[in-house]
Image (cartoon, rainbow, N blue to C red):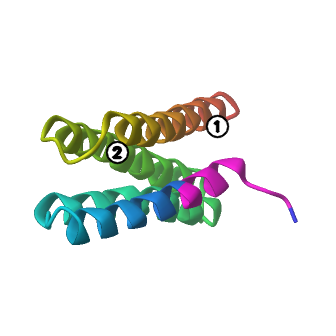
Amino acid sequence: MKTNIMLDRATAFSVRIVKLHDYLTTEKNEYTISKQIIRCGTSIGANISEANYGQSRADFHSKLHIALKECGETEYWLRVLSDSGYLSEKLFDSLLKDCLDLKYMLLASLNTSKKNE
């Protein structure tokens, strides 16, 4: 079976986001932003998965663009959580690195796909 590194990384990131949500709600009693970040942070991988089963190249591009937008939103909420004191610098840096890695992978995939049209 062919592996999809981007999907694997997005799935691992989703697991980290689920654990972050659990931490925020149980340890920090933070519910508003935690709901936002779990939605956008886990939808990155879901949209990458959908893109892999797209009905057309346009559908593939659309789903990857949605994943990219969700990645941008996740980055935003991570920065808000960090600036608000909910995340340690170490945790923020680690989560942000994973988020940015996914963003760059999505951009590269979209650029490559468009060049191959």
- Is the residue 110 above or below the residue 59 in the image? above
- Which residue appears at 32% of the width and 40% of the height? 75
Q: Residues within 10 Å of mark 2 (few under 14, many from 20)?
A: some
- Region rendered in magenta: 2-12
Quarter of the view holding residue 105: top right
Could you tell whether 14 is left or right of 39 in the image? right
- Is the residue 27 above or below the residue 102 in the image? below
**In the rendering, at what x and y percent does residue 3 appear?**
79, 57
**In the rendering, at what x and y percent does residue 60 appear?**
56, 54
Residue 47 at least partly seen? no
**In the rendering, at what x and y percent does residue 66 appear?**
39, 51
What residue did someone put label 1 on? 113
Residue 28 at least partly seen? yes
The quarter of the rendered structure image containing the C terminus is top right
The amino acid beneath tag 2 is Lys
Name the dominant secondary structure of the magenta segment: helix
Secondary structure under the numbered disc 2 in the rendered image: helix
**In the rendering, at what x and y percent does residue 111 appear?**
58, 29
